[in-house]
Amino acid sequence: IKLKYLAVSFNVIWIQPTLQSFRRFFGVGDDDDNEEYRWRMLRNLAIAPFAEEVVFRACLIPPLLVSCYVRTSTKSSVSGSAVVLLTPVQVSWIAPLFFRVAHLHHFYEQYRQLPLYRRTKSVLLQLTLGLVVQWTYTTLFGAYVSHVFLRTGSLCGVVLAHVFCNYMGLPNVSFAHPSSDLYGYRWFVVLVYIVGIVGFGMGFSSVVLFPRESLIPALLLRGTSR
């Protein structure tokens, strides 16, 4: 793989879009498009990440960790039930469900703004498919930042992760189209994606990125044992 492939990919995928965003955000003048863009970026990169992480991670996860459910034994030799606390893994997947429902208004707003003649079954199906995709990635992202918050106890860390996620958006697969400037480097871009996904997965059990002991469960356990 030639070094110029890396330079071109990095420039097209990261440097140029970032510079363009800065130019639009700090643009001089009364351009309505720039003004709307500034407010949208402030919402996506400052207000929403902070507010959502405070509510859905800092305020929601600790109560879930001390929540419990009744588990009834189904074995014939053992009868009865037991009260069981939710595990950190269960909490990491339950918390995003609230986070996911909080994004339901996007579907309603898109449908409400449609003219009456466009409210057809096919359009409704497209909106529903978009909602399913949105629910999928908000659930996966919510589970990840819940895991990070449980392990580190850092609100700042999950807010920064949220900001980065909102800025980067979903993976851009337009490089696979022949009209793309990156079409000739598509296999290299795919390789980079694979390396990133594998590294991301390996990071979950890393003692370099995370403390050996999950901080939030440990603090709650010590608080309840006194």
Image (cartoon, grey):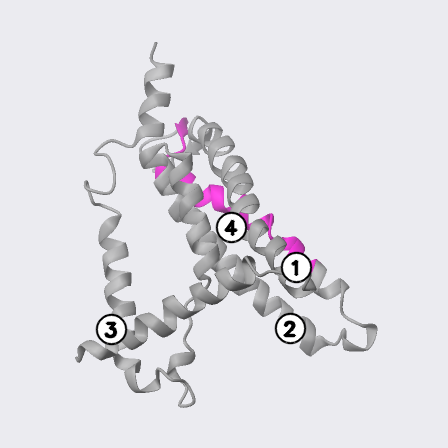
Give the mark nearer the N terminus: 2 vs 3: 2
Q: Is residue 132 above or below residue 95?
A: below
- Magenta stretch in the rendered image: 80-108
Residue 214 visible in the shown view: yes
| 85 inside magenta stretch | yes
- Name the residue: 34% across, 72% down: 11
Give the mark nearer the N terminus: 1 vs 4: 1
**Coordinates of residue 104 in the picture (x, y in percent):** 63, 54
- Mark 2, secondary structure of its residue: helix
The residue that label 4 is drawn on is 45
Camera-near label (3 vs 1) is 1
In which quarter of the view is residue 225 placed?
top left
Q: Which mark is residue 65?
A: none
Q: Is residue 88 above or below residue 140?
A: above
Q: CA distance from mark 1 to mark 4?
A: 14 Å
- Name the residue: 43% across, 55% down: 165
Q: Is residue 169 left or right of residue 198?
A: right
Q: Is residue 80 left or right of residue 199?
A: right
* Magenta residues, dominant SS class: helix
Q: CA distance from mark 2 to mark 1?
A: 29 Å
The residue that label 2 is drawn on is 125
Q: Which mark is residue 36?
A: 1
- Mark 4, secondary structure of its residue: helix
CB under 8 Å between discs 2 and 1? no
Q: Is residue 134 above or below residue 44?
A: below
Camera-near label (2 vs 1) is 1
